[in-house]
Image (spheres, helix red, strand yellow):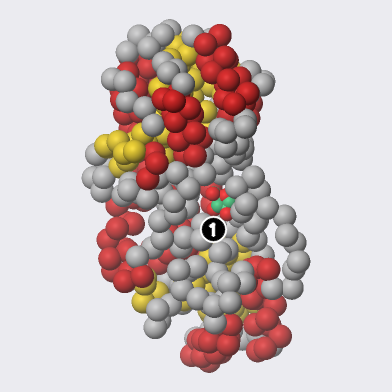
Amino acid sequence: MKNIVVGQSGGPTAVINSSVLGVYEKAKELGVEKVYGMVHGIEGFLNEKMVDLDEYLNSEENRELLKRTPSAFLGSCRYKLPKIEGNEEVYEKIFSILDKYEIDALFYIGGNDSMDTIKMLSDYAKDNNKKQVFMGIPKTIDNDLPITDHCPGYGSAAKYIATSLKEIIRDNASFGVVKPTVCIVEIMGRHAGWLTAAASLAKDDTCEGVDAIYLPEVDFDLDKFIEKVKHLSSTKSSVVIAVSEGIKTSDGKFVCEMGSDDKRVDAFGHKQLSGCASTLANIIAKETGLKTRAIEFSTLQRSATHIASLTDINDALTVGKRAVEEANNGSTGMMVTLGKDGSTDIYDIHNIANVERKVPIEWIDTENNMLNKEFIEYAKPLIQGELIPIFKDGLPVHLVRKV
Ligand code: F6P
């Protein structure tokens, strides 16, 4: 391969930049001349917005900083390529840019929506005898990509959630003796409950854990929820509950939409799911008169590189490297997958793009709104290890793109 390009797409994670580093390091090892980075994914690429990664990653110090830098260093996008038929000019434009910069392989780091880009480009290349190859690199805090055991990004977000919940549980317990306090914490993950399930990891020798967990895999029943909170607050002075942003009632209505008529969606048709903790906290306050608090982890959970999991960072690096190795061997239209032990493989993108993997229902204790031990055994290894930030003047230092 002469030159290659890598892009980041979709919601960022705490370790998405480690995959860029993996791509860069393996490419350089294989003698690739230029490693370009798309600025704001395929959307920026269509406008020829790219950086030469040598400018940033030619020093050991910067490579170490990149591993400790949150969000998408290159910039991200939520851009859906149009269907090929009738939109050939968009594809021709992409291939003309690839030809112009003598790019032989394109790597896209993203989740199930972003993998659609790899599917479309590899299909177009095949049907039109283009020489370039296209590889998907998994990433999502949602952990909802199929085939792969887990997704880089998930372990770090899970570690942040479990850590913060341990701290919240201590805080909530400090006032609760006089009158119970109910704290409802909202966690991202769209239609899959993997990340909310990570709330169960807060329980350990020094923490009693959360009192209930509500996942989108199980229909949400408001009356039962109110009953549960009433019961918990009659037996204990501090109640902490984790809810997924994507919980829905049996008629398909998102809890976060109760009382809202916002119909805005992104390019992939997803609504912004936000506000279910405050909706529920208000309902509980009204129904019980108890003190309530709503916490939305929001972007904190996907940008908390200061508490990233080292296992996750290493997985992110490894999938980036494997993608380059595979492209160098001529693979295309595939995504790298991870095994439980961090081993890698590749899989046909057609079975991955736009598919969502949910938490297995048998891992959920629906009676008690908790997770079974199968989940704990699955998730615990993914949050192991730390990479300490590099501090200056009391704050972590990051690597920031100039353009
Ligand atoms: O897909 C990752 C994710 O962080 C989801 O968990 C969340 O629902 C979504 O992105 C939020 O997207 P945005 O930041 O674009 O609102």
Q: Quickly name the residue at label 1.
A: 190
**Can the viewer see residue 209 in this picture?**
yes
Q: Is residue 90 left or right of residue 69?
A: right
**Label 1: element kind:** loop
Q: What residue sits 39% from the left and 31% below the top? A: 333
Residue 210 image position (x, y, % from top left): 46, 72
Q: Mark 1 Cα within 10 Å, few/some/many (few <14, many 20+)?
A: many
Nearer to us in this view, 108 or 369: 108
Q: What residue sits 55% from the left and 69% below the top? A: 247
Residue 384 image position (x, y, % from top left): 33, 48
Quadrant the C terminus occupies: top right
Q: Is residue 89 left or right of residue 154?
A: right
Does the closest atom of ligand 1 sit within 8 Å of the Cβ of label 1? yes
Q: Amino acid at mark 1?
A: Arg
Report which quarter residue 317 is drawn in: top left
Q: What residue sits 24% from the left and 39% below the top? A: 343
Nearer to us in this view, 207 or 148: 148
Vertical arrangement, residue 286 with respect to residue 193, above or below = below
Give the mark count. 1
